[in-house]
Amino acid sequence: MKVFQIGAAGGVGHRLSTLLTARGDEVTGMHHRKPEQADTIRAAGGTPVTGDLISDDVDALAAKMAGHDAVVFSAGAHGTGRDQTDLIDGQGVVKATDAALAAGATRFVLVSAFPESERGQGLGEGFEHYMSVKKTADVHLTHTDLDWIVVRPGLLRDEPGEGLVEAGLAIEYGDVRRDNVAAFIDAALHEPALSRVVVELTDGSTPAAEAAAQVAASTGPRT
């Protein structure tokens, strides 16, 4: 599989690149003109390519995605302000989905946010705006013709993970290590039956590949 990553140098992105390349997939990681980001992508086994969700138009993004089977979007504004949130987490997703369709990259995984994420922490209007933009981006993706998966992780943590998760259409909120988010996305990309579904994700006790298969089996008519 050829995978195009937007946010490849980020906390989830570079972990995912490592897993994908280890199984023999080809990974292209888009970064924003920072040499250290290109180095991170190369170190994880990917091929870096410069790109900008804000200044690149759909045609430019589609040209970069050409020849890829799947797109993983894990980029984010990361608290840099409402305008950046709109441009990256909101309009950036719209551009990326349009570009994927134009490029023929049918599989699309969007890393979103758990609906209960950090509620009650008094994070203010900026955070509420971020959550609203993320939800609108999810909705946009689900109305496309792409073979999409929305992954909504719980509170992200950096401690080492072992690839064990809890995943489902609706689960209780909790923490999840970035290693485990990457493990689940890696498994989800390679589970064809897991398609056009929103998955909530936390740390748990089920191996990621098994969890992806279980979620896939939980959708559709019962037999």
Image (cartoon, rainbow, N blue to C red):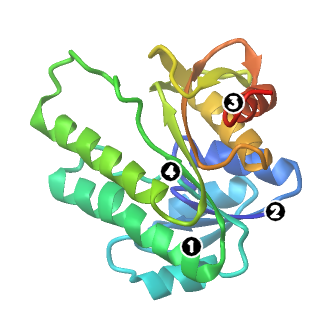
Q: CA distance from mark 2 to mark 4?
A: 18 Å
Question: Is label 2 in contact with label 4 (beta carbons under 8 Å)?
Answer: no
Question: Is label 4 in contact with label 3 (beta carbons under 8 Å)?
Answer: no
Q: CA distance from mark 4 to mark 3?
A: 21 Å
Query: Which of marks 4 and 1 precedes in the sequence?
Result: 4
Q: In what element is the residue under mark 1?
A: helix
In the image: residue 195, left or right of residue 113: right
Q: Which mark is residue 215?
A: 3
Q: CA distance from mark 2 to mark 1?
A: 15 Å
Q: CA distance from mark 1 to mark 4?
A: 15 Å
Q: Which mark is residue 1?
A: 2
Identify the residue position indicated by label 1 in the image: 100
The percent position of residue 120, horizontal first and vertical second, equals 21, 15
Q: Amino acid at mark 4?
A: Ser
Q: Amino acid at mark 1?
A: Ala
**Residue extending furthest toward the right:** 24
The percent position of residue 53, horizontal first and vertical second, equals 39, 70
Mark yes or no: residue 60 visible: yes
Q: In what element is the residue under mark 4?
A: loop
Instruction: Give the residue displayed 15% in from the left and 40% down from the top.
Output: 126
Query: Which of marks 4 and 2 precedes in the sequence?
Result: 2
Identify the residue position indicated by label 4 in the image: 74
In the image: residue 209, left or right of residue 100: right
In the image: residue 8, left or right of residue 219: left
